Image (cartoon, rainbow, N blue to C red):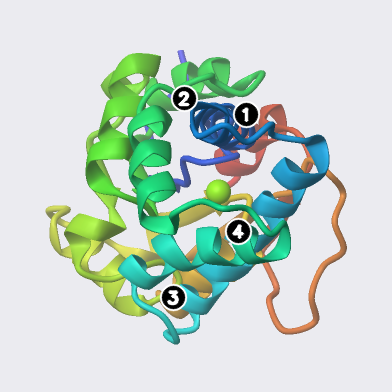
Amino acid sequence: MTERKSLYVFLDLDNTILDFAKAERTALAQALSERGVTPTDEMLCRYSEINLACWEELEKGNWTRAEVLVRRYERLIAEFQLSLDAQEIQRRYEQLLHEGHDILPGAEDLLKTLFARYELYLASNGTDSVQRSRIEKSGIGKYFKEIFVSERMGAVKPQREFFEACFARIPGFEPSRAIMVGDSLTSDIRGGINAGIRTCWFNPEGKSLREDIRPDYVICSLDELPEILERL
Ligand SMILES: [Mg+2]
């Protein structure tokens, strides 16, 4: 039997454990269809890019969450000259997003393995009700000691305040025994660095590293993670 070690493992949710790309696409396609707009591949792909760029504005502290949620649709509507109301699409999209809970390949096996050995925490940027609904429907909630969603923490990844609020809720927490694992360099990895803990970048698409954000570890498949954690 493997000895249980004290290690605090913070996992990102979207595109690390749950398939957010699919959830987003499905919810947006339906929201558009309901409003009489035929969702094209180009539109859905472009939305995904716009959405990421908008969340980066939040990560940089330029926009509030509320601004991100609506402006991403304002941009999409402007680019594709759609006659839609951004607020309305946002509301419907978010309702539909509650349903998106496909687990990424290998993620549940990973959670089972890690759950037997370490303390797991979810650290997610997003809307609290949406994330909790998706976690519940996917059945992965049982693996986590606590679920930290930015909306409720009063700060977002990569802000140090987000992580400090998480750490404050963990009795006996030691930063030297913690690691943040996620697919985003700008929120997960920069956040972990800001908070003074180890970081592991999940990079399944083989994206290039950035000079200014250096993770301690890089994995392209989730099944590489247990071995890395074993060495800590
Ligand atoms: Mg993510």
Q: Earlier in the sequence, mark 2 or mark 4?
A: 4
> Alpha carbon of mark 3 to alpha carbon of mark 4: how far?
40 Å
- Decide which of tag 1 and tag 2 comes sooner along the chain: 1
Q: Which residue is mark 2?
A: 100
Q: Which amino acid lies under the numbered mark 4 shown in the image of this protein?
A: Ile
| Comparing labels 2 and 4, the label whose residue is closer to the camera | 4
**How many neighbours does mark 4 have within 10 angstroms: few (below 14), some (14-19), or many (20 or more)?**
some
User: Looking at the image, which residue is at 63% across and 68% down?
Assistant: 53
Nearer the observer, 177 or 83: 83
| In-image side of 141 versus 59 (left or right) | left
- Type of amino acid under label 3: Gly
Which numbered disc covers residue 196? 3
Is 223 above or below relative to 211?
above
Out of 60 and 222, give the one closest to the viewer: 60
**Residue 219 drawn at (x, y percent):** 74, 44
**Are the two marked residues, 1 and 2, in contact with CB atoms closer than 8 angstroms?**
yes
Task: Give the quadrant of residue 103.
Answer: top right
